[in-house]
Amino acid sequence: MKITFLGTAAATSFPLTFCQCKNCKAAKKHKGKSIRKRCSLLIDDKILIDLCPDFLTALNMYGKDISKIKYLLQTHPHSDHFDAGHFVTRMTDYATENAPNLDIVASKNCLLRMSEMIKSNEDIDIFDKKWQKDLNIALNEIKHGQEINFENYKILAIESLHDLKQGSLLYLIEKGKSSILYATDTVVFSDKALDTLKNRCLTCLILDHTYGFVENHGGHLNEKLFLQEIDKLKKINAVNSKTLIYATHISHEGCSYHEQMEKDAKGKYLVAYDGLEIKI
Ligand SMILES: [Zn+2]
Ligand SMILES: [Zn+2]
Ligand SMILES: [Zn+2]
């Protein structure tokens, strides 16, 4: 599988919109990999994880063709991960031509919230078959432990305690012998999640590293918890010495500019950056 990191920032961006803290100032000085857009991921140019506000900018920057994207895996509907404004342009009213069919995978609560967000932009009901036809979408409701197959991909939903009310999910994507766990936004893994991940021997783990080297303020992981969760995954044989481990969802609160973050990782994991493309 080919994995493209379209964005790797927490909240709106890194540097954060109005912030003048030392980490934001350092990112502005160092530029390059230190400038981060909102989190989303592209797999084999056709599976998008999170229709975030910056995904289109990222596709254009990295020479990706939106018409190849057939599947959307939505982790949750927080505004840094779902942008209703982009979504509604699929309507006939916007004169969009030939929008390719999009299979959307999300939890029930996530779909309900997405629907509200979409309705606040346009008078559209994504649960209505008539609208699904107009938008050329299919909804695939999924919950923890359920699997859905597209082409040669197996997609498994895993609960995330990040925001249960809004149905946050993590996704494990497998194709052949390769597997990726996309695990942002997340707090520590639940027992249910760990049970599902047992003996998965992941090829690649992409994990929430929001708070970096400061205290954890909730909803996400800092570096201490990030390493603690990796240890838990090693104990259940979900992660082994060959697993590629990437930190993502990076916040100015406890993370420095990219090159410093790489030094701080001390070889224990890799730090993702926008535009990074890997093959596993
Ligand atoms: Zn987020
Ligand atoms: Zn800042
Ligand atoms: Zn979130």
Image: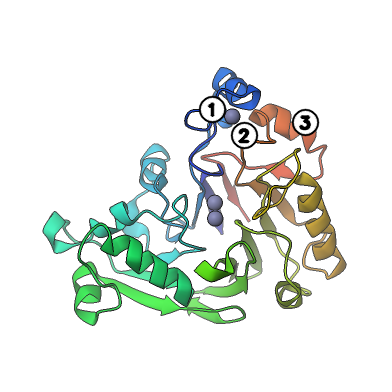
- Looking at the picture, tell me which residue is in the foreground, 151 or 144: 144
* Residue 151 in view in this figure: no
Mark 3 vs mark 1, CA separation in Å: 24 Å
Q: Is mark 2 within 8 Å of ligand 2?
A: yes
Which quadrant would residue 160 be assigned to in this image?
bottom right
User: Alpha-carbon neighbours of circle 1 within 10 Å: few (<14), some, or many (≥20)?
Assistant: few
Indicate which disc residue 19 carries: 1
Q: Earlier in the sequence, mark 3 or mark 2?
A: 2
Indicate which disc residue 252 carries: 2
Which quadrant would residue 204 be assigned to in this image?
bottom right
User: Alpha-carbon neighbours of circle 3 within 10 Å: few (<14), some, or many (≥20)?
Assistant: few
The quadrant the N terminus occupies is bottom right
Amino acid type, label 2:
His
Mark 2 vs mark 1, CA separation in Å: 9 Å
Question: Given contact means CB atoms under 8 Å apart, are the residues at marks 2 and 1 in contact?
Answer: yes
Q: Is mark 3 within 8 Å of ligand 2?
A: no
* Residue 105 in view in this figure: yes
Foreground label between 3 and 2:
2
Q: Is mark 1 within 8 Å of ligand 2?
A: yes
User: Alpha-carbon neighbours of circle 2 within 10 Å: few (<14), some, or many (≥20)?
Assistant: many
